[in-house]
Image (cartoon, helix red, strand yellow):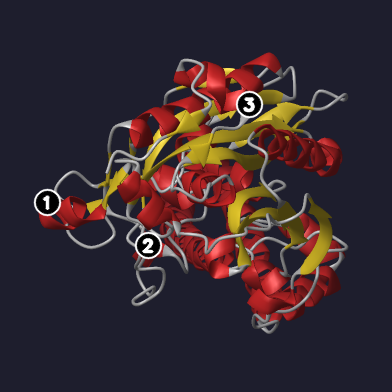
Amino acid sequence: MIDLRALREDPERLRASQRARGEDEAVVDRLIDLDERRRSALSRFESLRAEQKSFGKSVSKAKGPEREALLARAKELAQQVKQAEAEADRLEGELAELLKTVPNIIEDGAPAGGEQDYVVLEHVGEPPSFDFTPRDHLELGELLGAIDTERGAKVSGARFYYLTGVGTRLQLALLNLAMDQAIEAGFVPMYPPLLVKPEAMDGTGFLGAHAAEVYRLPDDDLYLVGTSEVPLAAYHMDEIIDDLPRRYVAWSSCFRREAGSYGKDTRGIIRVHQFDKVEMFSYCTLEDSHEEHLRLLEWEKQMLAKVELPYRVIDVAAGDLGASAARKYDCEAWIPSQNTYREVTSTSNCTEFQARRLSVRHRDDSGKTRPVATLNGTLATTRWIVAILENHQLADGSVRVPKALQPYLGGQEVLEPVR
């Protein structure tokens, strides 16, 4: 949720952000109008209530006909106070609902435009050159006895799968490596709940434009998380926290309906309904959030180096940002079978947007409370298996294990085909 005080002081900043996102900038004028009417209604209510309190003292002192007249006026005044309060409450509700539809103001420097208007910041590593026709991750996974999508579809439907044998061990190795790196960097390890209340899901901004992506259990009024960003952001909901930054890292399963992705990435495990992920999450001051964002990106790059993947870093364009993000960097690994880069990590600076909705605050140097900034970043996820298998494959269908992963696989250096 954006800061109304900042909007009043500089409405053009939100207009520019809306334009960069490709969103309606007329919402700025509607917000300003509603805010002015709300404040005016609130001022009238408070003035009438003060008059009512003062008038009550006069009634208590009056007698006879004068008292009757004053009582009649007091009754009239009480009705006016009630109406003024109702009007202020109504406008407050309208303003709150409109604010929920407005995405975060983008950070200065974020590219304008849509999905294809990202800016490539750097390339790291060289895509592998094969002297044989490379297999895709599903063919390799089946040869290794690591991935079974046929039985996943039989049991659960499209976009479900089993990781089997060495596939299971590879995922555990990858995610344990990520957890160990984060813990070594000072993150507090977490295993969060995977079902959350509506206020947690809404507070993080996932019930807006992307609500169709979220699984809901209507009988329980709970949501399955698509990322542990949600329970981590809500962990300090309605709290005042100090000693910033606070850094947490969570291992969780994640669930996404993938609504609107019909026909996209139907082969293998690139785009699926369920996957595991290690997610970094940070609470810090707004002033520190830009540098903290770069730190999260650096930790992601360290993980990609450990699993020896070629990748590029992109600055995601404003129109492709989620509602909560002011800026986002993606790391995209090279996928040989597709001859392109695909996202494997994402880190977002949500500034104060989520904290305002969730009421997470800290005390500044003057002792006043203000919202914290929240940031998140992927450190490893099931999709990484795709890039690891394809980039490290050998001609006979075996796969070389990156050195950093070998201790988590009992020292195994090569994954051998089982069929």
Label 1 – label 2 distance at C-alpha: 21 Å
Image quarter in which the C terminus is found: top left
Density class for disc 2 (Cα within 10 Å; few <14, some 14-19, many ≥20) is some
Which comes sooner in the sequence, label 1 or label 2?
A: 1
* x then y, percent, for residue 254: 38, 44
Q: Is residue 352 left or right of residue 110?
A: left
Q: Label 1: which residue? A: 155
Q: Label 2: which residue? A: 213
Q: Quadrant of residue 130?
A: bottom right
Residue 403 circle label: 3
Density class for disc 3 (Cα within 10 Å; few <14, some 14-19, many ≥20) is some
Image quarter in which the N terminus is found: bottom right
Label 1 – label 3 distance at C-alpha: 35 Å
* x then y, percent, for residue 62: 51, 43
Task: Give me the residue at 68% from left, 32% from top.
Answer: 306
Single out the mark in the foreground, 1 or 3. 3
Single out the mark in the foreground, 1 or 2. 1
Task: Find out whether the residues at labels 2 and 3 contact each other: C-beta distance under 8 Å.
Answer: no
Q: Is residue 290 above or below residue 340?
A: above
**Element on which disc 2 rests:** helix
Is residue 61 visible in the rendered image? The answer is no
Single out the mark in the foreground, 2 or 3. 3
**Element on which disc 3 rests:** helix
Q: Quadrant of residue 339?
A: bottom right
